[in-house]
Amino acid sequence: MQNNNKNRRNMNNKNQTFDSNGPTGRIKGSTKQISDKYTSLARDAYASGDTVLMENYYQHAEHYFRVSNYLKNNYENRKKSFKNDKQETQEDVKVDKKIKEEVVNEEKVANQQKKEEVKAEKENKGLKVETQEDVQKVKPVKKLVRRKRILKSKIETQQEG
């Protein structure tokens, strides 16, 4: 099976490596590392008396600081969202199980009531109440009678035709 996502980049990874082309050259690292590097360069520029370069470094540091905060907040929000989705799914499963149990219990109660009603009707009519064993004895006989009827009807249709 081929992975079709190998060329896609995850833009919400807080540990993602960035390349920065600043005033003095290229800096590589995470957003936190780049921000710290520009802040230290700004302090060095201030110590040497170059306020324009210091301001430029601070602007670069602020940019990467904001990117870092965005990625951090986005990561935390996605993590919370995932936890909430997982909890909702677990709650849905619990509710579904409860509903199924209630339906099964209602069906059992309804079947039991129906059996009791049938039993009471037979007793009122003076009929013998059949046990499960009696019913099983009668079923094969009913099947034989049914088969005989079907065979008779087939024979009659063949004789007519």
Image (cartoon, grey):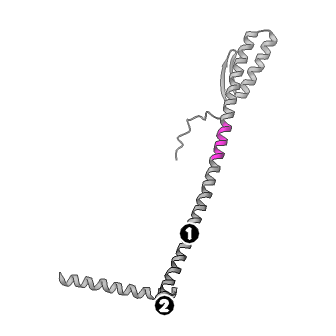
Q: Residues within 10 Å of mark 1 (few under 14, many from 20)?
A: few
- Secondary structure, magenta segment, majority class: helix
Q: Residue at x 73, y 28 (%)?
A: 32
Residue type, numbered disc 2? Lys
> Quick one: SS at disc 2?
loop
Residue 106 place in picture, x, y as percent: 56, 69
- Comparing 68 with 22, the one in front is 68
- Comparing 129 with 2, the one in front is 129
Residue 152 place in picture, x, y as percent: 27, 86
Q: Quadrant of residue 37?
A: top right
Q: CA distance from mark 2 to mark 1?
A: 29 Å
Residue type, numbered disc 1? Glu
Circle 2 residue:
128
Residue 97 place in picture, x, y as percent: 60, 61
Residue 161 place in picture, x, y as percent: 17, 81
Instruction: Judge whether 97 appears above or below 11 on screen.
Output: below
Residue span colored magenta: 75-84
Q: Quadrant of residue 29?
A: top right
